[in-house]
């Protein structure tokens, strides 16, 4: 169980407001102030400060303590969950991943992990990067695989692989296998994942980099999952932008084709992430080693 004063500090880090923190924790505002002063006295350093507009900020030492407290809190919740399980139950590994990798690559990693550690059980959670990082902090998961930057004072992050984004279409599409200028794509329907997803944000960045927008296309379809996007493209409903590794199998078996775009390149780094100084680092590294083995195998392109 996390010390109450550290829990108060973590809540204040999120709210940046003493009154809101008091309301959330069901304590008085003077109690919040007392908890913070106690921590500053104990560690003999300033943890927070106000700027000229009375906005609350963390000092560098405050950021360090927050990272420590987040890890302690998350680890303690995982330990609590494990201690409540019968001793003869297999140890559970909880991981998170983006929907993009969760529907394609990560299941192969989980399968290989269970082959090597058959006495384990695995729970996999799919979500967006921000939500997965929050689940790390709350102890719901032990690590995640995402394609976004993670501050090194809060997280341990290891580069897994770099992924290229490509434009895909049906083999029956007029542009299948051809090399075109970006603007030539505008004559066709664009298919993409729904708003408020990493996939959608990546698409918008790609389009804006090439002075494009979804409204430049003939029409578009917005849909829920990456597998649904691929299926609609296979039906020759339109074109889409997708990570190459996600479409690799369908490109190889001929159910999808690639449209090559002149002067186009888009790359993203996928990272393996857990909370800094976590007690569960050795277990996390076991799965990380399995990930590297899978990525070195023939399954993964390039």
Image: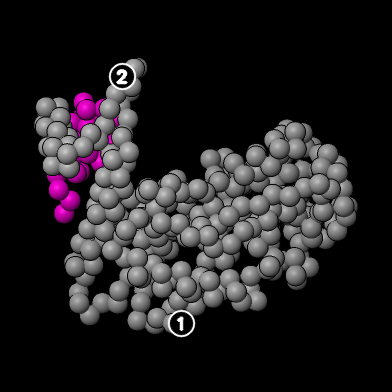
Give the vertical position of 250 relative to 133 (above or below): below
Viewer-nearest residue: 45 or 55: 45
Give the vertical position of 89 relative to 277 (above or below): below
Which quarter of the picture shows residue 79?
Answer: bottom left
Could you tell me which secondary element the residue under label 2 belongs to? loop
Viewed as shown, does residue 172 lie left or right of 70?
Answer: right
Say whether residue 280 is magenta.
no
Q: Nearer the viewer, mark 2 or mark 1?
A: 2
Q: Which residue is mark 2?
A: 54
Q: Which quadrant of the figure contains the C terminus?
A: bottom right
Could you tell me which secondary element the residue under label 1 belongs to? helix
Viewed as shown, does residue 101 lie left or right of 140?
Answer: right
Viewer-nearest residue: 42 or 205: 42
Viewer-nearest residue: 40 or 246: 40
Q: Where is residue 156 drawn, in percent x and y?
A: 41, 56
Can residue 30 be seen here? The reply is: yes
Give the vertical position of 287 relative to 10 (above or below): below
Residue drawn at point x = 22 percent, y = 80 percent: 88
Viewed as shown, does residue 183 lie left or right of 46?
Answer: right
Secondary structure, magenta segment, majority class: helix
- Residue 239's tag is none
Q: Earlier in the sequence, mark 2 or mark 1?
A: 2
The residue segment tinted magenta is 1-24
Q: Residues within 10 Å of mark 1 (few under 14, many from 20)?
A: few
Q: Where is residue 64 drawn, in percent x and y?
A: 30, 45
Distance of label 2 from label 1 (alpha carbons): 55 Å
Q: Where is residue 201 drawn, in percent x and y?
A: 59, 41
Q: Where is residue 78 drawn, in percent x and y?
A: 26, 61
Residue drawn at point x = 43 percent, y = 78 percent: 114
Say whether residue 9 is magenta.
yes
Q: Which residue is mark 1?
A: 115
Give the vertical position of 130 relative to 112 (above or below): above
């Amino acid at each position: 169980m996390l010390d109450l004063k550290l829990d108060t500090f973590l809540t204040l880090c999120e709210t940046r407001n003493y009154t809101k923190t008091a309301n959330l924790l069901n304590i008085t505002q003077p109690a919040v102030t007392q908890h913070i002063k106690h921590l500053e006295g104990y560690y003999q350093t300033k943890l927070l400060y106000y700027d000229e507009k009375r906005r609350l900020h963390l000092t560098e030492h405050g950021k360090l303590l927050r990272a420590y407290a987040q890890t302690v809190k998350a680890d303690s919740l995982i330990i609590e969950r494990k201690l409540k399980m019968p001793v003869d139950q297999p140890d559970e590994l909880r991981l998170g991943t983006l929907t993009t990798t969760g529907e394609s690559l990560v299941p192969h990693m989980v399968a290989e992990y269970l082959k090597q550690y058959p006495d384990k059980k695995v729970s996999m959670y799919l979500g967006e990067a921000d939500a997965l990082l929050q689940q790390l902090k709350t102890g719901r998961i032990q690590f995640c695989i995402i394609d976004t930057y993670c501050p090194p004072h809060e997280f341990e992050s290891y580069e897994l692989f770099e992924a290229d984004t490509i434009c895909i279409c049906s083999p029956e599409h007029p542009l299948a296998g051809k090399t075109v200028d970006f603007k030539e794509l505008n004559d066709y329907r664009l298919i993409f994942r729904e708003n408020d997803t990493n996939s959608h944000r990546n698409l918008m960045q790609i389009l804006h980099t090439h002075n494009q927008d979804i409204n430049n296309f003939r029409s578009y379809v917005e849909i829920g999952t990456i597998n649904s996007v691929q299926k609609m493209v296979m039906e020759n409903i339109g074109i889409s932008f997708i990570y190459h590794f996600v479409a690799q199998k369908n490109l190889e078996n001929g159910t999808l084709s690639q449209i090559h775009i002149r002067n186009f390149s888009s790359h993203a780094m996928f990272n393996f992430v857990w909370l800094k100084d976590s007690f569960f680092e050795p277990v996390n590294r076991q799965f990380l080693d399995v990930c590297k083995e899978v990525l070195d195998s023939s399954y993964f392109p390039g």
